[in-house]
Amino acid sequence: MSYIGGASPRIKLDAGVYNSTEYPPELTLPLHNELSYSSSFPRYLYFFCEIEPAAGGETTFGDGRQILEMIDAEVVDEFKRRGGVRYTRYLVNDESAYSWRAAFETNDRGIAEDPAWPSRPDSNGRRTVRWPFCKRAPQR
């Protein structure tokens, strides 16, 4: 699986293999669902650490099914009533790790604007998609 369209700066190491998010070590990456803003997401994630950090380096894991069960039913119903969750991304037109070039691993703007993606960026590089509150993941 590729990380094309992904939101975090990552380096492609091999086909379907990427490094972890390129954040400075003083920043914490909170618990999240991998590629939840995308129409496809991985069934499995693998982690590897070649060099153990002197401090920090923790990875938080959570069971999304259990977390959903802990959310108040009224909150879940409100998300369903509103038609899900809206994600808005800004893909900048520069050479940064957050550019459309980095996100789509290409210099071809036509690929980043491909109508097969759920939405096309507007003139400011903003792309908005709406997904259901919950997506059924493949069974374990």
Image (cartoon, grey):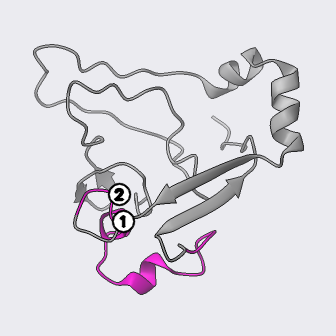
Dot label at residue 92: 1
Residue at 43% x, 39% y is 45
Callout 1: few (<14), some (14-19), or many (20+) C-alpha neighbours within 10 Å? some
- Camera-side residue: 108 or 42? 108
**Image: magenta residue range:** 96-120
User: Can you say whether 56 is above or below 8 in the image?
Assistant: above
Asked whether, in this view, residue 42 is left or right of residue 87, the answer is left
Residue 22: name its quadrant.
top left
Q: Secondary structure at mark 1?
A: loop
Q: Secondary structure at mark 2?
A: loop
- Camera-side residue: 104 or 91? 91
Residue 3: name its quadrant.
bottom left
Magenta span includes 110:
yes
Q: Quadrant of the C terminus?
A: top right
Callout 2: few (<14), some (14-19), or many (20+) C-alpha neighbours within 10 Å? few
- Give whichever of discs 1 and 2 has the lower sequence position: 2
Dot label at residue 16: 2
Magenta span includes 46:
no
Which amino acid, by three-letter code, is at mark 2?
Gly
Residue at 85% x, 41% y is 80
Dot label at residue 104: none
